[in-house]
């Protein structure tokens, strides 16, 4: 089935079909792709939910199996690292619960961003929809799983009587900052990894390294005088703008600034790449 058009198709490109919004410059077409993709929220939300249902078909607990696994991890790591670092479990377990849940979300969109176009090759080649729909579909399904995992923090907070108060209202704003960054990261990784298939294993190794250098299982104050090193880790700031409000603490201005600047700079660079290479993605598959 032939759908879409691509003006720069080469005779060696294969049989890919690309969503094309029509005339206009590459920048305008890339902008239309993003705008129309976001406007089709019914499509990508249903596709994302279908992915969840398909993955856990005939399962009794469904995505809550991940929640159960996360709960066991929080309990075991909380006891082990709380003892090693001599931390008060009342303060450490909530910190660990929200940190692990958020990091799992981060690691998921980093890993799946690498294969977002590759795993959807048949759909991209045969259905005329914006490329951004595929990004939002994967992002939405990971957000659903994140919602299941965050239940663990709610239980821990209830047990230890944590009440975030008014500052807790900043957590959804922090989540929005994380989602805006997640979208451009997935789009950029999707393009790079579709073109260069050796990149996904490299990203997987980097994710493991980032996990240990990001304060997920350990608190930044353990660095002492070298705590300034955390300013160089953007993922620390993206987690902190969610974790701190849920713990009843105000995130530092540097975390908000880093998250917003990371989003602006990332989207400027990614949009330029998307405008230039959008028409080639289907032919790299």
Image: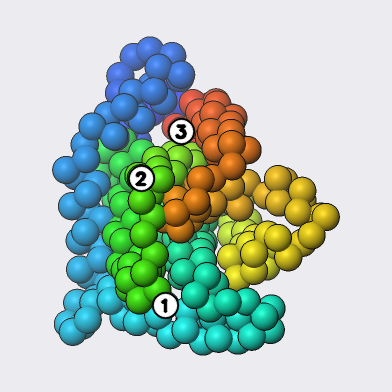
Q: Secondary structure at mark 1?
A: helix
Q: Residue at point 59% right, 42% down?
A: 252
Residue position marked by numbered label 3 in the rendering: 278
Image position, residue 61 (x, y; %): 22, 81
Of badges 1 and 3, the one in the foreground is: 1
Q: Residue at point 46% right, 69% down?
A: 94
- Vertical position of residue 144 compared to residue 165: above or below: below
Q: Could you say which quadrant of the image residue 208 lies in?
A: bottom right
Going by the picture, which residue comes out furthest to the right?
Answer: 225
Left or right relative to 4: residue 94: right
Can see residue 237?
yes
Q: In terms of sequence position, does the residue under pointer 1 or pointer 3 come before the other?
A: 1
Residue position marked by numbered label 2 in the rendering: 166
Image quadrant for the N terminus? top left
Image position, residue 32 (x, y; %): 33, 23
Q: Could you say which quadrant of the image residue 3 lies in?
A: top left
Q: Residue at point 19% right, 77% down?
A: 57
Q: Secondary structure at mark 2?
A: helix
Q: Secondary structure at mark 3?
A: helix
Q: In terms of sequence position, does the residue under pointer 2 or pointer 3 come before the other?
A: 2
For the residues labelled 2 and 3, the Cα–Cα distance comes to 43 Å
How many neighbours does mark 3 have within 10 angstroms: few (below 14), some (14-19), or many (20 or more)? many
Q: In terms of sequence position, does the residue under pointer 1 or pointer 2 come before the other?
A: 1
Which residue is nearer to you in this view: 169 or 18? 169
For the residues labelled 1 and 3, the Cα–Cα distance comes to 37 Å
For the residues labelled 1 and 2, the Cα–Cα distance comes to 27 Å
Instruction: Identify the mark at residue 70; answer none if there is no mark.
Output: 1
């Amino acid at each position: 089935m032939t759908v879409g058009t691509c003006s720069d198709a080469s005779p060696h490109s294969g049989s890919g079909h690309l969503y094309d919004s029509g005339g206009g410059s590459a920048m305008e077409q890339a902008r239309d792709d993003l705008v129309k993709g976001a406007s089709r929220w019914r499509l990508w939300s249903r596709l994302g939910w279908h992915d969840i249902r398909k993955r856990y078909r005939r399962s009794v607990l469904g995505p809550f199996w991940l929640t159960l696994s996360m709960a066991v991890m929080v309990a075991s790591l909380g006891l082990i690292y709380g003892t090693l670092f001599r931390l008060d479990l009342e303060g450490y377990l909530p910190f660990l619960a929200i940190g692990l849940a958020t990091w799992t979300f981060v690691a998921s969109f980093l890993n799946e961003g690498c294969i977002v176009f590759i795993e959807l090759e048949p759909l991209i080649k045969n259905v005329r929809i914006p490329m951004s729909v595929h990004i939002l579909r994967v992002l939405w399904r990971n957000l659903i799983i994140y919602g299941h995992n965050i239940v663990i923090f709610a239980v821990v907070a209830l047990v230890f009587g944590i009440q975030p108060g008014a500052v807790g209202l900043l957590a959804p704003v922090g989540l929005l900052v994380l989602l805006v960054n997640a979208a451009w990261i997935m789009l950029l990784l999707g393009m790079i990894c579709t073109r260069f298939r050796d990149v996904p294993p490299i990203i997987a190794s980097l994710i493991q390294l980032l996990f240990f250098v990001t304060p997920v299982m350990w608190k930044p104050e353990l660095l002492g005088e070298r705590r300034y090193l955390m300013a160089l880790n953007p993922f620390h700031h993206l987690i902190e703008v969610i974790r701190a409000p849920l713990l009843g603490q105000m995130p530092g201005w540097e975390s908000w600034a880093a998250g917003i600047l990371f989003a602006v700079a990332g989207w400027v660079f990614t949009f330029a790449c998307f405008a230039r290479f959008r028409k080639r993605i289907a032919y790299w598959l």
